[in-house]
Image (spheres, grey):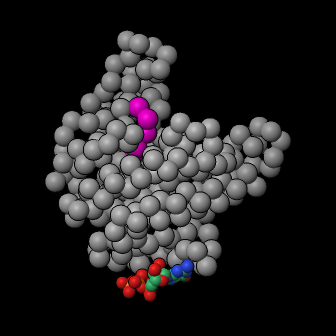
């Protein structure tokens, strides 16, 4: 097994499946099954999930809304996704804990690093909701921050493309995929992997990032086993 403790970053938008909005139950259950496969291998799993399927703060700002207000609404959206994922994981027999960066004690534990680590050691999947709890940060930044704090071996960024390309594969059919890549090269070539805050946190703390297609069942396990899936970004 290549990784012992991981931070899985899931996209909120991917949770929509073929829908225009909200949560597609089939996609949610696929993710849950994929996560179970790696928990069964005794991998310790922390998860951060976005909220873009429900609300996007940046877009709300374009429509005239105050950015801070929009970002907090986005954080609430991540909590809805986190709760859905928690339920999905529990229906297939996993033990989970949900921690929130914003106090919502009726529905989630507060984020406490030491408790999170203890849960992981006991084999519980820990979902970190509400992003970083601060406006102007993305859930990629939340994933990087939690990964650094709880000492993860790697961030696995589940997306709908199968890695990092030298140009947009949806626009350029001859785009080339990287198997591995350094943070410096990604920066020099302006390759978008994460926003700069998240990117810098990973680079400075030497946390590798694997970008892979989470929508293909079984891919997550392949990454954990060290198979050639997605793109590995390292220092
Ligand atoms: P350990 O006993 O330390 O292994 O962890 P534990 O999570 O089992 O113990 P704890 O007594 O802290 O939690 C029992 C249950 O209550 C778990 O499902 C927690 O997620 C939940 N829980 C703990 N604190 C809070 C809280 O502040 N709010 C909410 N909503 N649930 C909480």
Point out the residue furthest to the right here. Answer: 64
Position of 84 compared to 150: left or right?
Answer: right
Work out whether 49 lies above or below 210. below
Q: Main secondary structure of the magenta part?
A: strand
Q: Quadrant of the N terminus?
A: bottom left
Is there any visible trace of residue 206 in the rendered image? no
Q: Nearer the viewer, residue 201 or 226?
A: 226
Q: Residue placed at 19% from the left, 40% from the top?
A: 227
Which quadrant would residue 56 be assigned to in this image? top right
Residue 159: within the magenta?
yes
**On screen, 187 above or below 128?**
above
Q: Position of residue 55 (x, y in %)?
A: 67, 48
- Where residue 4 sits, quadrant-wise, is bottom left
Residue 192 location, x and y as percent?
47, 32
Furthest-left residue in view?
Answer: 1
Mark yes or no: residue 77 visible: yes
The answer to whether residue 146 is magenta is: no
Residue at the image point whose x is 36% and y is 32% from the top: 162
Q: How many marks?
A: 0
Residue range in magenta is: 157-161
| 25 with respect to 149 (left or right) | right
Question: Residue at the spot x=56%, y=49% of the render?
Answer: 23
Viewer-closest of 17 and 42? 17
Work out which quarter of the rendered image holds the C terminus and state it.
top left
The percent position of residue 22, horizontal first and vertical second, equals 61, 48
Indicate the position of residue 171 as horizontal and vertical percent values: 49, 16
Residue depicted at x 46% and y 51%: 28
- Left or right, 152 with respect to 10, comes to left
């Amino acid at each position: 097994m290549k990784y012992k403790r991981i931070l899985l970053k899931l996209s909120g938008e991917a949770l929509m499946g073929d829908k225009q909005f909200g949560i597609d139950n089939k996609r949610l259950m696929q993710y849950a099954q994929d996560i179970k496969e790696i928990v069964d291998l005794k991998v310790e799993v922390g998860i951060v999930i976005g909220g873009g399927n429900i609300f996007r703060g940046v877009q709300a700002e374009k429509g005239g809304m105050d950015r801070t207000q929009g970002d907090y609404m986005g954080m609430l959206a991540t909590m809805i996704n986190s709760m859905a994922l928690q339920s999905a994981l529990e229906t297939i027999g996993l033990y989970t804990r949900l921690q929130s960066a914003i106090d919502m004690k009726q529905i989630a534990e507060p984020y406490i690093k030491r408790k999170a680590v203890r849960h992981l050691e006991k084999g519980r999947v820990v979902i970190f909701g509400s992003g970083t709890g601060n406006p102007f940060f993305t859930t990629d930044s939340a994933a990087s921050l939690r990964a650094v704090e709880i000492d993860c071996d790697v961030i696995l960024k589940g997306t709908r493309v199968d890695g990092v390309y030298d140009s947009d594969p949806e626009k350029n059919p001859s785009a080339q995929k990287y198997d591995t890549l350094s943070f410096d090269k990604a920066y020099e070539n302006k390759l978008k992997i994460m926003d700069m805050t998240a990117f810098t946190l990973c680079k400075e703390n030497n946390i590798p990032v694997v970008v892979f297609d989470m929508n293909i069942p079984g891919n997550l396990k392949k990454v954990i086993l060290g198979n050639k899936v997605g793109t590995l970004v390292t220092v």
